[in-house]
Amino acid sequence: MESDIVIANSVDIKPIEEVAKRLDIDKNDLEFYGKYKAKINKSSKEVKNAHLILVTATNPTPYGEGKTTISIGLGDALNKLGKKTLITLREPSLGPVFGLKGGATGGGYAQVIPMEDINLHFTGDFHAITSANNLLCAAIDNHIKQGNALHIDVQKIKFNRCMDVNDRALRNIVLDNDGIKREENFNITAASEIMIIFCLASDLKDLETRLGNILIGYNMDGEPVFAKDLKVEGAMTVLLKDAFKPNLVQTLEHNPVIIHGGPFANIAHGCNSLVATNLSLNLADYVVTEAGFGSDLGAEKFLDIKCRIGHLNPDCVCLVTTIKSLKYNAGINNFQEEDTDAVKKGLSNLKAHIDNLLKFNVNLIVCLNKYHTDFPSEIDIVKEYCDSLDIPFSISTSYTDGSNGSLDLGEKVIELCDKKKQLHYLYSEDLSIKEKFERLAFNIYHAGSIKYLDKAKAEIEQIEKLHLDHLPICVAKTQYSLSDDKNKLGYPKDYEITVRDIKLYSGAGLITILLGDIMTMPGLPKEPNFEHIKLDSNEKIVGIF
């Protein structure tokens, strides 16, 4: 983030119905949440003709790579270049907003507004997802208390409660259901299976079916028990009915943005909802979307999971990096001094992500998000490196210059979108669980061997017994490294990767593999971001960045 730019929360903002007109959305197709936010109540069943552009990044660092800022800047630039463009993003979780990262609506002059509303309660989608999740949990414990006709094994319940804040004290707790005690743990809402289902369902009927297919546990005979056995999926769908409609907001330049769904990419699949993407493809000629964290997490899951389930084929992938990121991956944390050797060393991380993405047969461009601490000689190194690989390269200054800062990027993206390529998945679904994970471990994480802990082996056997091993793989791991160890920076290779646990998300249609010490309920840092959030003397929210 540039230290000398602050965008006040009193910026010019248009009534949302004026923004909707840019997309030919009638006022009657909007459900208003105040003057500047609305849900779109419109079908997306038509043929998809728009160009789909995915924005991803090299591995995250504590300094931020600006992936959302670039997504917004690119979308604004494409609109300025005369292309009817719609930016489609995830909703922020309160966990990062109050925790370590802060908000998730871009920065500087490439922001989505009303920023404070979006970062906080927005239109209540996360609350609806939390409520549906916890209704199912209450139904499980109530069934057990009321006679347990399904003979649910209390020690083999697989579905957990959730809430949308970081609270490490809820990672491991003991429930007392009127004398029936069992261990339980909370997930953060962004990591719940309900969130994943919400973002992968194609319509309300599909949503209800997927909710009913959630594996809640096993009975005393070892047979699976599903949410539909409790007859709760209908009520859960009712709770999610309004939330399931995509949300419309705007950029600082008054271009339309759809924000909907918010799964974490280091735990879940890290993409906005499929219904939002499909709707966007029908409303615009160009759609800019993003996938969370680095390409090893977000982009891989977007391509292998979301595109597979939604039958999508991106026309271009924009890989964002920064000089800070390259130096950090070289072990340098001083960004005030020119250091071309560190940049050259850090190119190994950029190379890893380029290598990974080219395996999917996509049109690729590298975008350097320029900071005021960057030196021309350092930028030249990155450009020359991309030129040597025949990879298009662009510099973005959208943080300081808005759409004007990404015009070159926009022009190059338009050119790439006209070069049609057919997406290649990294693995076939008919492979075994271990074979699918091997494709990821060896080709994306560049491991040399895999170690499965006993718990993971047992889960694989159980999933195979249920004949659900054909599902795609969603890997939960650290975002800070290609590996399962956040301290392995750059381009780690030929190490041993450890599979700690495996979770079957039968409703979502995924098998999640947990690596390292990844947690589905994050904790707050020593100095959480909520310490800076308050109302000023004019009752305006400050402290969200």
Image (cartoon, rainbow, N blue to C red):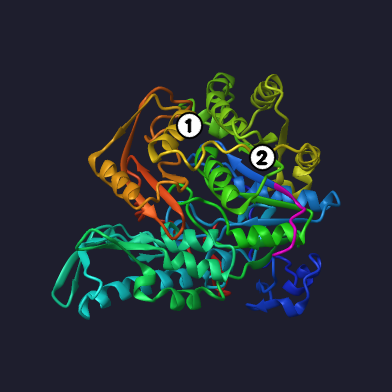
Residue 122 visible, this orientation: no
Name the residue nearer the viewer: 411 or 100: 411
Q: Please tell me whether residue 123 belongs to the stretch shown in magenta.
A: no
Name the residue nearer the viewer: 373 or 411: 411
Tag count in the figure? 2
Q: Residue at x 41, y 27 (%)?
A: 447
Q: Which residues are magenta?
A: 45-52
Whichever of callouts 1 and 2 sits on the residue coming sooner in the sequence is: 2
Amino acid on which disc 1 is placed: Asn
Tag 1 residue: 333
Label 1 sits on a secondary structure element that is: loop
Residue 427 visible, this orientation: yes
Amino acid on which disc 2 is placed: Cys
The percent coordinates of residue 436 (x first, y second) are: 44, 37
Residue 86 sits in which quadrant? bottom right
512 vs 189: above or below: above
Name the residue nearer the viewer: 214 or 66: 214
- Observer-side mark, 1 or 2, equals 2
404 vs 94: above or below: above
Residue 318, numbered label: 2
Task: Check the picture and name the quadrant holding the C terminus.
Answer: bottom right
Look at the magenta stretch and give its main secondary structure.
loop
Task: Check the picture and name the quadrant holding the N terminus.
Answer: top right
Residue 460 sits in which quadrant? top left
The percent coordinates of residue 57 (x first, y second) are: 58, 39
Q: Residue at x 54, y 66 (%)?
A: 206
Name the residue nearer the viewer: 481 or 330: 481
Find the residue positioned furthest to the left: 179
The percent coordinates of residue 304 (x first, y second) are: 55, 43
Residue 29 appears left or right of 226 = right
